[in-house]
Amino acid sequence: MTNMISYSTEVQEAIEQKKPLVALESTIISHGMPYPQNVETAREVEQIVRDNGAVPATIALMDGQIKIGLSDEELELLGNSPDVAKVSRRDIGQLLATKKIGATTVAATMICAELAGIRVFATGGIGGVHRGAEATMDISADLEELSNTGVAVVCAGAKSILDIGLTLEYLETKGVPVIGYQTDEMPAFYTRHSGFPLSYGSQTTEELAAILKAQWSLGLKGGAVIANPIPQEHALDKDFIDGIIEQAMAEAKVNGINGKEVTPFLLGKVKELTEGQSLVANIELVKHNAKVGAELAASYGAL
């Protein structure tokens, strides 16, 4: 297995010096934002992790290897290549064998982070149960991965286009802790409010780290969702974004868009209908998650 995983110089030095590491996904670079904003944001996010006491490890598949930490040249290639594959658990073997470029989703990033011994992962938002899933069975692989893989995912909740209530029910059934960071309500990506209360909340990263340590010390399988709301000054109004999403969902239905094409269509339509406000919010919440993720990784490493 070791010949399929390679570490950047910065990450390798961090491992040797026992510095805290934060995993970062790469789908947000290749599929989540336009170029060059995607690469600029990736570099900013990495720097935020460094500035807050940890070392960034952006993860991707390249040249038949799982890359834990990317060079500037690799980041640029990932953000500017037209044929980057979107990688979940089912795709990892295929992409490694064919040596194609693959950007890791939340699920795949969790797998690779655990293989590399990284316990904290900062992203934008997790996938979840799609609206209408009782008929389509469209449920993100992120949720199943959270029940199996021992990585804490710092995120701004589940994406607003999803059924957040059913997503929380699914996570509860799978035994995945969902812990609000300085909130008692599940955030909904672009907005701080979803209307769904959380059973657990914490005000400090030290307490979050202690909760994770206790869970994993017992050998309990699975990860955790650290629900970290978008900062108030960058949040969109809940009624406004809910109306936009309803309109985007209606257009998707009229155009016969389904399956894996739904999420990118909806996110693109939301960006269009909000006149770019959603992209700005997306970038800001990712930065905030990187900051909290770095603080959490440092707190966990200090235990």
Image (spheres, rainbow, N blue to C red):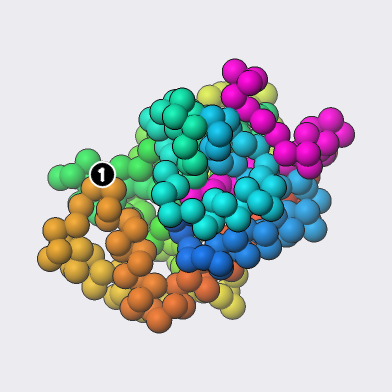
Q: Position of residue 151 (x, y in %)?
A: 59, 35
Outermost residue, right direction? 17
- The image shows residue 230, relative to residue 91, as above or below, that is below
* Residue 240 located left or right of residue 27: left
Disc 1 crowd rating (10 Å Cα; few below 14, some 14-19, many 20+) is some
Q: Where is residue 119 in the image (x, y as percent from the top left)?
A: 65, 35
Q: Position of residue 243 (x, y in %)?
A: 29, 75
Look at 73% across and 54% down and name the residue there: 49
Which residue position is annotated with label 1?
Answer: 138
Evaluate whether residue 174 shows in this view. no
* Residue 171 located left or right of residue 152: left
**Boundaries of the magenta span:** 1-29
Look at 56% across and 68% down and name the residue there: 37
- Of residues 117 and 260, which is closer to you in this image? 260
Q: Position of residue 223 (x, y in %)?
A: 54, 35
Look at 42% across and 37% down and name the residue there: 88
The quadrant holding residue 87 is top left
Look at 49% across and 45% down and name the residue there: 103
Outermost residue, top direction? 1
The number of discs equals 1
> In what quadrant of the picture does the N terminus appear?
top right
Outermost residue, bottom direction? 275
Tag 1, which secondary structure? loop
- Of residues 141 and 198, which is closer to you in this image? 141
> In what quadrant of the picture does the C terminus appear?
top right
* Residue 57 located left or right of residue 275: right
User: Magenta stretch containing residue 20, yes or no?
Assistant: yes
Of the residues shown, which amino acid type is indicated by label 1? Answer: Asp
- Of residues 67 and 198, which is closer to you in this image? 67
User: Magenta stretch containing residue 249, yes or no?
Assistant: no
Evaluate whether residue 278 shows in this view. yes
